Image (cartoon, rainbow, N blue to C red):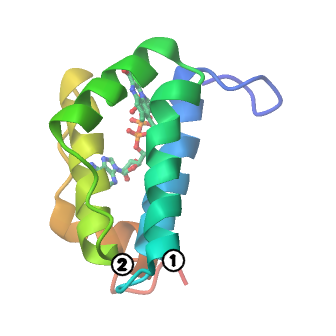
């Protein structure tokens, strides 16, 4: 890992981006308005165009076509991001994440209160 004052490499950029995306999904409304849905779709569809890791962006764009985003609720969106992240995990030979634990990881923290 590079020191924090260095420009982010693919790993640091990925960690920061997944934190942003999963946390944003965790706080997305249960019943989003049309405006909120449209903005979430814009955010997701901007990634293949703008994400500053070209091959990551291209692969993510392909996955988007295979699995159109479900922006209809907080729960569905969180699951959708978890599944897309797991596809990248699989590609990189990393462990699969249990999507039942997505709220614990990104919203509520573990039941033992160790993150409070
Ligand atoms: P990350 O994978 O960054 O995960 C951070 C934390 O999220 C984990 O510690 C875990 O607590 C949690 N987590 C893990 N999986 C899930 C999940 N499925 N759902 C919810 N939470 C989870 N890197 C490449 O080398 N090649 C690529 O093609 C590539 N494509 C990417 C595409 C996108 C859209 C993004 C955002 C990142 C991409 N990356 C890619 C970066 C890669 O996914 C990792 O972020 C990077 O390798 C650092 O991995 P990490 O092991 O630190 O944890």
Label 1 crowd bin: few (<14), some (14–19), many (20+), radius 10 Å: few
Q: Which residue is label 2 attached to?
A: 110
Q: Nearer the viewer, residue 104 or 80?
A: 80
For residue 85, the mark is: none
Residue situated in front as seen by the camera: 34 or 9: 34
Q: Is residue 79 left or right of residue 31?
A: left
Residue 32 picture quarter: bottom left
Res. 2 in view? yes
Task: Please tell me how crowded label 2 is: few (under 14), some (14-19), or many (20+) other residues with Cα within 10 Å.
Answer: some
Q: Are marks 2 and 1 in contact (CB under 8 Å)?
A: yes
Q: Residue at x 41, y 82 (%)?
A: 108
Quadrant in which ligand 1 is drawn: top left
Say which residue appears at 54% left-offset and 22% top-offset.
10
Give coordinates of residue 91: x percent, y percent. 21, 22
Residue at coordinates 39% horizontally, 18% vertically from top-left?
58
Q: Secondary structure at mark 1?
A: loop
Q: Which residue is mark 1?
A: 115
Task: Say if 33 sits above or below 1 in the image.
Answer: below
Q: Percent position (x, y) of residue 63?
A: 24, 32
Q: Indicate the position of residue 6 as horizontal and vertical percent values.
A: 79, 23
Is there any visible trace of residue 51 in the rendered image? no
């Amino acid at each position: 890992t590079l020191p924090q004052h260095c420009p982010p490499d693919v790993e640091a950029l990925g960690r920061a981006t997944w934190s942003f995306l999963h946390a944003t999904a965790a706080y997305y409304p249960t019943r989003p308005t049309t405006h909120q849905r449209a903005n979430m779709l814009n955010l997701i569809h901007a990634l293949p165009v703008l994400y500053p890791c070209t091959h990551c962006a291209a692969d993510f764009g392909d996955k988007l076509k295979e699995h159109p985003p479900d922006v209809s609720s907080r729960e569905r969106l969180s699951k959708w991001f978890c599944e897309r992240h797991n596809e990248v995990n699989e590609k990189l030979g990393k462990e699969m994440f249990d999507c039942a634990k997505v709220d614990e990881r990104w919203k509520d923290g573990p039941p033992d209160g160790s993150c409070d």
